Amino acid sequence: DIIEGLHKCGVQKDKLDHMTCPVKCDEILKRTYTLKEEKPIRLGFAGRVNAKQKRMDLVPVLVNKLQELGVNYYFEIAGEGDYAQRLRDFAAGSKLEQRVRLVGRLDRKAVEEFWKDKDICLSLSDYEGRSISIMEAMANGAVPIVTETSGVHEDITDGENGYIVPVGDIDAMADQIASLDRHRDRVSIMGQNAHDTICPKCQMRDHLQYWETLIENIAGGDS
């Protein structure tokens, strides 16, 4: 998507290339999912907690919609930003502390554990590049439900290993969460598919080969 966008702006395609930055991904996915409907389906977000890009100002709208739909959910938000305190105030004021929790900034070593504890990864962004956070979530078997920003089609096939909704369409996002809440068997299938999509793209040998080839071409004057 980014390459096509640059090409439309006048950059020649033979001057453009792209690669995937590997994220940690175990070859075999080992985790559990919340399959019993009496237990809350576990939602997660990891990133900057701001309104300008990440649209965390839409979290209260989403949460209220989930409440209306009767979704049994638990939502953990990892990260810090200028909207974090407002979300804490919202959760407290709405008496939803048992549903919505901000866990603050995570140590890099805690990211894998965070996502293996989640059934669903959410992104409400207005724009993104290739989201490392979404890739990390998928690598650990979380099902992505994300807005249609640049890069998501690179990894997500709608309805197979996640869901893509229009930017700003909170109703569509809530409906997809509600659907997975009602059909918990889909979560483990789609989560496995998410992992299986990301894992082949995160082989370090391929990443190193890309850079070796690029450097050789530059050194040989072929760039």
Image: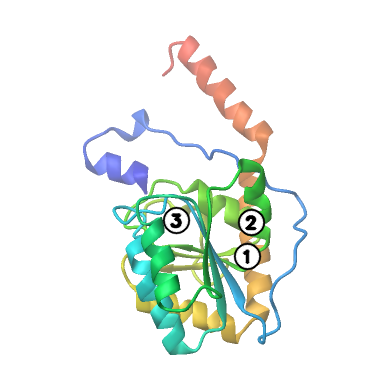
Marks 2,1: beta carbons within 8 A: yes
Give how far apart the Cα atoms at labels 2 and 1 are.
7 Å
Using the rendered image of the protein, determine whether residue 147 is visible from the camera's viewpoint. Answer: no
Question: In x, y percent, where is residue 103?
Answer: 55, 57
Question: In x, y percent, where is residue 18?
Answer: 45, 36
Instruction: Name the kind of residue labelled 2 in the image.
Output: Phe
Question: In x, y percent, where is residue 150?
Answer: 37, 52
For the point 45% across and 56% down, which residue is it?
A: 152
Q: Compared with residue 20, is residue 166 higher up or lower down, i.e. above or below?
A: below
SS for callout 3: helix
Mark number displayed over residue 114: 2
Identify the residue position indicated by label 3 in the image. Answer: 152
Identify the residue position indicated by label 1 in the image. Answer: 118
For the point 29% across and 53% down, which residue is it?
A: 52
In this rendering, position of residue 141 left or right of residue 71: right
For the point 46% across and 79% down, which residue is it?
A: 95
Label 3 environment density (alpha carbons within 10 Å; few <14, some 14–19, many ≥20): many
